[in-house]
Amino acid sequence: FLRHLADVTECAILLIDYRLAPRFKFPTAVEDCYDAYIWAYEGAKYWKVDPDRVFIAGDGIGGTMASVVSMMIRDRKGPQPAGQILLYPLTDCRLRTQSMVEHKDSPTLNEKMLSYYVKSFEREPKDILSPIFSPLLSQDFTRLPPALIIAAENDPLKDDAVLYKEALIAGDSEAAVFIAQGAFNGFMPFKDAKGREETEG
């Protein structure tokens, strides 16, 4: 899928293989992604990549990581990406949204799975209140890179995308959300999945 995405966007893509839970707990994966971004940005010129056109992106938990790393870059005064592209990110790990209730039994991602993922990642329950665990709970949405957030209509994480866009806009950061109609969480890698063609368009 990433080869296809690189082809249609005419962009170079670097896939980050961050250390995974439950073996590696919070914030290991977050710091891995931050370190990888800094390393990649500083090496962009060696790969003939324009450093002013570097974007940070991810899907699912990868989208969560991308949003969190964008905040960390700002707070640590690192080199800002040109934008962030978040595909169906989990932004509030308390799992309390209306779409979480409406789509709790979604066939590709359900409430039980999400609860397991969150518990596997946290060191202790209070971790979910950290803005680098649940970015929607941040107190500061200013000075963040422009965000394109892609969501699926039939997804427990749909509201996470919408609410995060609203928080960014309220913080005077640019953001837009696109909801793929008829789609389910994780649709993008599947060639014939509902929503993929209109999302790529």
Image (cartoon, rainbow, N blue to C red):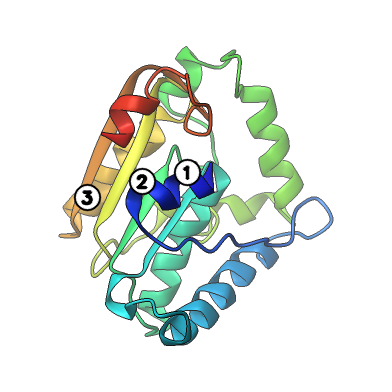
Drawn side of residue 179 relative to residue 70, left or right: left
Q: Secondary structure at mark 3?
A: strand
Q: Secondary structure at mark 1?
A: helix
Residue 92, how many percent across, how many down? 47, 42
Spatial CA distance of label 1 from label 3 is: 25 Å
Drawn side of residue 101 relative to residue 112, left or right: left
Pick whichever, 183 or 27, lies toward us.
183
**Pointer 1 residue:** 4
Q: Secondary structure at mark 2?
A: helix
**Pointer 2 residue:** 8
Spatial CA distance of label 1 from label 2 is: 6 Å
Q: Earlier in the sequence, mark 2 or mark 3?
A: 2
Q: Amino acid at mark 1?
A: His
Dot 3 crowding, Cα within 10 Å, few <14, some 14–19, many 20+? many
- CB of mark 1 within 8 Å of CB of mark 2? yes
Give the residue displayed 40% in from the left and 66% down from the top. 70
